[in-house]
Image (cartoon, grey):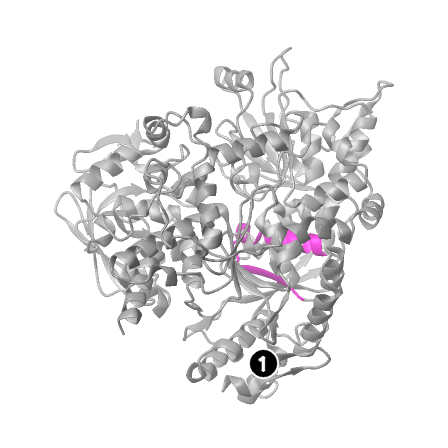
Amino acid sequence: MNIDYRKPLPNAGIDFFDTREAVDAIEPGAYAKLPYTSRVLAENLVRKCAPDMLTDSLKQLIYRKRDLDFPWFPARVVCHDILGQTALVDLAGLRDAIAAKGGDPAKVNPVVPTQLIVDHSLAVEHAGFEKNAFEKNRAIEDRRNDDRFHFINWTKTAFKNVDVIPPGNGIMHQINLERMSPVIQARDGVAFPDTLVGTDSHTPHVDALGVIAVGVGGLEAESVMLGRASYMRLPDIVGVELTGKPQPGITATDIVLALTEFLRKKRVVSAYLEFYGEGASHLTLGDRATISNMTPEYGATAAMFYIDQQTIDYLRLTGREEKQIALVEQYAKHTGLWADDLETAEYERVLTFDLSAVGRNMAGPSNPHARLPTSDLESRGIAAKWDEEEGKMPDGAVIIAAITSCTNTSNPRNVIAAGLLARNANQRGLTRKPWVKSSLAPGSKAVKLYLEEANLMSELEDLGFGVVAFACTTCNGMSGALDPKIQQEIIDRDLYSTAVLSGNRNFDGRIHPYAKQAFLASPPLVVAYAIAGTIRFDIEKDVLGTDKDGNPVTLKDIWPSDEEIDAIVAKSVKPEHFRKVYEPMFDLSVDYGKDINPLYDWREMSTYIRRPPYWEGAMDAERTMKGMRPLAILGDNITTDHLSPSNAILASSAAGEYLHKMGLPEEDFNSYATHRGDHLTAQRATLANPKVFNEMVLENGEVKQGSLARVEPEGQVMRMWEAIETYMNRRQPLIIVAGADYGQGSSRDWAAKGVRLAGVEVIVAEGFERIHRTNLIGMGVLPLEFKPGTTRKTLELDGTETYDVSGEPSPGATLTLVVNRQNGEQLEVPVTCRLDTAEEVSIYSAGGVLQRFAKDFLEAEAS
């Protein structure tokens, strides 16, 4: 039984569960061969798993078997305000549904501690060259999001186990790294590894600390919040040996962009990676965090680093208590989670990556894994020469240059490098081009404090990189409005305009509607491109400007040395900066339930927060999977940005027209992301990205780009939302057919909610991104996968067909997709059911996560 393995942790005054003893009791010596991930998962099983399941579950880890599901119980749930708020809106709606059935709504609470950080709501309406930009942007954020923030404030006291960090304080992943994760938890007299799920695909940021942190959709997070185990089968655990040492002048951004390309090619999709080796010892914790943050961009689930002295030094640097730091070291060394104890770990696959081979890199256009060496800008056709016209923007104009995102601003070396490059540029008399909207949006207030300590904040401000926010901003598509004159020139001249940002995503249409393409770069390179003013520039060779003596200045003339960067980091980044920021932030004393109605008083005219419809109408109807018509036939690499964009709402869009009818002024339309608590607005974002190619819509024999659909059987082409409304009025069941890597990108539950509310019952694709597949199941949509060699093209699908699915959905089962052609021909296509576990079957059969919980809750109440 589990209790047998509970023992005192030596010299710590706390107990632990002796996982080594439990594992070695099954197979002597097995624990020493387990990878880091398996050791942490095994501890979770020994401590939390039902006794009758423990042995079989541990055998899955010991013998690297994948034939049984085993439970995982994350210690925490971390949310940003977009998915976190929508998850809590769902729970508030669930309370209403429970109350309507006679249950006690006050009993519907997160069981697992849940932390919500408001970081996704601020748009950069005022740029970094404006005075008081931060205060102005925060005032706009509060005005636009009054309904949302009213609801979030209600959740703080209405729900147990929910802590809220209000807007203006930083980005969830950076706060998690710098403060929220203890690395080793201490609860109820027991020490155990910190683990979590987060409602964002970049949750693995904190994997750099040796913490298993997995990005999930809002729906899966809701399931974990409500106490259900996250069931899994043993993932592929891949060792990544890092060799060599980074070259001088190479940043963590350069390394991670090279790694992203490398790991994509090695097909690590859904794997848990463990980085180790001599090269890992040359990386600071901040460097490691940059690598772990980009996990979804190379397709993995987690990107772990072992606990070692770098971990301890970082905990001390960021102001953690000495007692907690001592617990981390003692626990890790005693339980085999310390780096030295992992030398005997065995991996089924090992990849080797040489850090010394990495040069200066960017990524783009359009994809984070499309590495672009800065040495190849001319040969790739990026740095093409252009004819300058006096008083006009150049071809390839950089209209947005943003130091943004936890990916890079959690790394002091990257931020200090940007500040030093700005200082050097200022000394040479270089300036930002006037059409560049520049901004600095750190993920932590500590960043501003150490930049001020280093006398570099003013240098960045002089180049237009003043602090505009402590939030996601441009990385999340919240880059704000352009100067109207600049926007009009882009439109009038059909100008190829671009964005350069230190973020983690650069998908088409994500950063700004008028930035035709976007490039990822390190913070110092972002500053350099603000000076250059165009992507049509060889950043390594071309002249950025001239100094006061008329001498040409190039990038190498202003790039800071590693020695200077490291010296300033050592001198200027201090524990007191982090304590000053986080100690008041985490004074979270809340009086739960006092004078609070357990049912939310929904604001009738709100376009932000509305009672969800998941227990009524089409959502309550039977899914027949018969006579389905295709809403869209899509190609490869469809992202959640295609399926439900997050950026600014244009007046001409279906959502814009709806908001206008609701009386909202255009300047306050805000983003699609912020309206996801109101299904009537959020539905209208379904496949609303103007970059979508629906292969059912042709023009002169070519697929026409745009948010368009063809309604059958009439064959009439119309805007996607009008097509959805047409089918909803007909109660027509729908299907989506797609290519490979369907649903990659952000863990966006509305990419699943939107299609389900439209009437989509099935999605059949060549492959699914992990998080999106679970979101589909969480909404009661059946994911089916074509067998190898079968595609929409080999089947010659054109959208005039109707579709049926036959067979009983079960894990890995082969079902039959029946294609009924217009000419009467019928084609039976074998497809794989991508309900991968019994838990997923249970959720799907109930109609989704919320329906499953409601049924179980009411049954428990009645018993």
Q: Residue placed at 41% from the left, 44% from the top? A: 638
Residue 663 position within the rendered picture, expressed as x and y whole percent measured from the top left: 36, 26
Q: How many marks?
A: 1
Q: Nearer the viewer, residue 163 or 4?
A: 163
Q: Nearer the viewer, residue 92 or 654?
A: 92
Residue 581 position within the rendered picture, expressed as x and y whole percent measured from the top left: 69, 48
Image vertical order of residue 347 relative to residue 421, above or below: below
Q: Quadrant of the C terminus?
A: bottom left
Q: Secondary structure at mark 1?
A: helix
Residue 9 position within the rendered picture, expressed as x and y whole percent measured from the top left: 67, 80
Callout 1, which amino acid?
Thr
Residue 203 position within the rendered picture, expressed as x and y whole percent measured from the top left: 55, 54
Image vertical order of residue 577 relative to residue 664, above or below: below
Span shown in magenta: 285-306
**Most distant residue in the front direction:** 595
Task: Evaluate whether residue 276 shows in this view.
Answer: yes
The part of the image, by quadrant, that contains residue 91 is: bottom left
Q: Is residue 574 left or right of residue 733?
A: right
**Most distant residue in the left direction:** 824
Q: Is residue 160 left or right of residue 290?
A: left
Q: Residue placed at 67% from the left, 41% from the top? A: 522
Task: Evaluate whether residue 785 shows in this view.
Answer: no
The part of the image, by quadrant, that contains residue 430 is: top right
**Most distant residue in the top direction:** 390
Disc 1 marks which residue?
Answer: 19
- Does 278 lie within the magenta span? no
- Does 297 lie within the magenta span? yes
Label 1 Cα crowd, 10 Å radius (few <14 / some 14-19 / many 20+): many
